[in-house]
């Protein structure tokens, strides 16, 4: 399951982090190894975090993966804080940025949300990185630019545009946690959600007295049979996203009189 520890982006030296993020300075190893670079180090670190979890990440572990001495990494990356910043920025480069984003504002925000959802499923360790002080690298900035473009020109103020993007991406960050935990549970227990439900459902139906817990018994049984599990994270994500977009629609309509479908002309 997800580790409870949290790492924080933006903890490294600002000048060194920004130099790495924007590649304004690339130092050569003291041993002159042409095969060792920031990009190679970062890719190895991401692979470790993806497969072993963020708790396993250390400069020594990265050096082992690259079959080099730990100290040789420091000629390219000052430390773990700076490395984490570049890792976060690098995976954000996987987000597609079609220009212009097709559809009306609602479809555009849906695209933003689903792209973020998939990114976190590929790199679940992102859930352990607090980004209230974000790594201001080229991919993170490009993503922010792209996401703001989803609501540009629809009558919102700059602060409202920022708040809408923050609302949607923050919702994804919270909602995807359940999906990641479900996937990890299946992998670590060897039991799918459906198998878990089939094993537990008969006992739950006997144990939960509908006279004492009428709503829990009725709703829980209906949901469990439909989901064939305790929950359906993908369905819950879609439902919650639709409700958030409904709320944003009220704001947009109040500003511009845009029709209720969210299909503006842009």
Image (cartoon, rainbow, N blue to C red):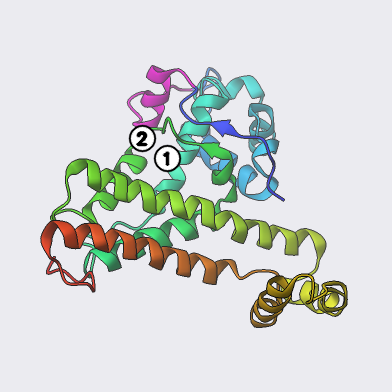
Left or right relative to 146: residue 219: right
Question: Looking at the image, which residue sits at the far front?
Answer: 211
Q: Position of residue 19 (x, y in %)?
A: 37, 24
Look at the picture and state if 223 lies above or below 48: below
**Depth order, front residue of 252/135:** 252
> At x 59% / y 22%, what residue is drawn?
72
Left or right relative to 192: residue 168: left
> At x 23% / y 41%, what residue is drawn?
159
> At x 32% / y 26%, what residue is drawn?
24
Residue wearing tag 2: 137
Look at the picture and state if 244 lies above or below 260: above
Q: Which residues are magenta?
A: 12-28
The answer to which quarter of the image holds residue 3 is: top right
Q: Secondary structure at mark 2?
A: loop
Instruction: Find residue 89 and name its label.
Output: 1
Q: Is residue 129 magenta?
A: no
Say which label, 1 or 2, has the lower sequence index: 1
**Depth order, front residue of 82/169:** 169
Crowding at mark 2 (Cα within 10 Å: few <14, some 14-19, many 20+): many
Look at the picture and state if 2 lies above or below 208: above
């Amino acid at each position: 399951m997800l580790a409870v520890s949290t790492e924080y982006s933006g903890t490294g030296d600002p000048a060194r982090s920004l130099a790495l993020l924007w590649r304004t300075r690339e130092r050569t190893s003291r041993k002159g190894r042409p095969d060792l670079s920031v990009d190679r180090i970062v890719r190895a670190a991401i692979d470790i975090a993806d497969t072993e979890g963020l708790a396993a990440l250390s400069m020594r572990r990265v050096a082992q993966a690259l079959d080099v001495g730990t100290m040789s990494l420091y000629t390219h990356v000052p430390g773990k804080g700076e490395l984490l910043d570049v890792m976060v920025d690098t995976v954000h480069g996987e987000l597609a940025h079609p220009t212009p984003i097709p559809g009306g504002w609602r479809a555009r925000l849906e695209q933003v949300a689903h792209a973020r959802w998939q990114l976190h499923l590929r790199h679940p360790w992102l859930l352990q990185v607090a980004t209230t002080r974000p790594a201001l690298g080229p991919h993170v900035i490009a993503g922010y630019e792209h996401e703001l473009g989803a609501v540009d020109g629809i009558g919102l103020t700059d602060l409202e545009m920022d708040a809408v993007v923050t609302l949607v991406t923050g919702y994804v960050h919270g909602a995807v946690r359940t999906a990641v935990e479900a996937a990890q549970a299946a992998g670590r227990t060897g039991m799918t959600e459906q198998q878990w439900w089939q094993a537990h459902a008969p006992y739950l139906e006997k144990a939960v007295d509908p006279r004492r817990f009428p709503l829990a018994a009725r709703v829980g049984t209906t949901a469990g049979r439909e989901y064939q599990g305790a929950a359906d994270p993908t369905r819950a994500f879609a439902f919650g996203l639709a409700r958030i977009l409904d709320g944003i629609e009220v704001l947009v309509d109040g500003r511009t009189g845009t029709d209720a479908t969210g299909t503006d002309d842009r």
